[in-house]
Image (cartoon, grey):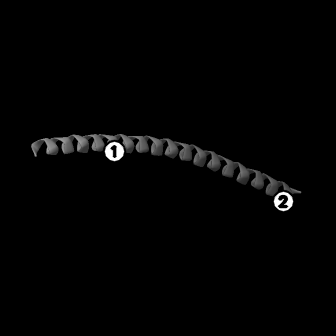
Amino acid sequence: MFWPMLAIALGFLGIAVLGVLAVKVFIEAQRLGRQVTRTTQRINRAAEDLERATTDLAATGEALR
């Protein structure tokens, strides 16, 4: 009777450990998703600034001709 109870207890502990690890992975995946979103927004903002700067530079070059 001891061995079946030990097997059940160890099985439960194994499932509990996997559950905790799954929650940690889920939290980190959400954090990574938020970081990717922020980085994408920064890249888009930088691309817009670059486009604006090149437009101004092209206008300045045309004015110098």
Name the outermost residue toward the bottom.
3
Q: Position of residue 26 (x, y in %)?
A: 60, 46
Task: Give the camera-side residue of 9 and 47.
Answer: 47
Rendered residue at 55%/43% (across/down): 30
Residue 9's spot in the image, x, y percent? 78, 52
- Nearest the camera: 34 or 60? 60
Indicate the secondary structure of the residue bearing disc 2: helix
Residue located at (28% from left, 44% from top) = 50
**Residue beneath disc 1:** 47
Q: Which residue lies at the image location 10% right of the left edge and 43% below the top edge?
A: 64
Q: Are marks 2 and 1 in contact (CB under 8 Å)?
A: no
Please indicate whether residue 28 sits to the left or right of residue 18 in the image: left
Q: Amino acid at mark 2?
A: Trp
Judged by depth in the image, the label closer to the viewer, 2 or 1, is 1
For the point 41% across and 41% down, the residue is: 41
Residue 4: image x %, image y %? Answer: 85, 58
Q: Which amino acid does the dot numbered 1 rest on?
A: Ala
Point out the tag, 2 or 1, that comes first from the N-terminus.
2
The answer to which quarter of the image holds residue 23 is: top right
For disc 1, the neighbor class at 10 Å (few under 14, some 14 to 19, many from 20) is few
Q: Mark 2, residues whose alpha carbon is within 10 Å: few (<14), some, or many (≥20)?
A: few
Number of numbered discs overlaid on the protein picture: 2
Residue placed under numbered mark 2 in the picture: 3
Give residue 52's position: percent from left, percent from top. 28, 40
Q: Image check: 35 left or right of 18?
A: left
User: What secondary structure is found at the residue carrying circle 1?
Assistant: helix
For the N terminus, give its image quadrant: bottom right
For this view, does 62 lie left or right of residue 39?
left
Q: Left or right? Give the position of 64 relative to 16.
A: left
Q: Nearer the viewer, residue 53 or 35?
A: 53
Furthest residue in direction front, as rendered: 65
Q: CA distance from mark 2 to mark 1?
A: 65 Å
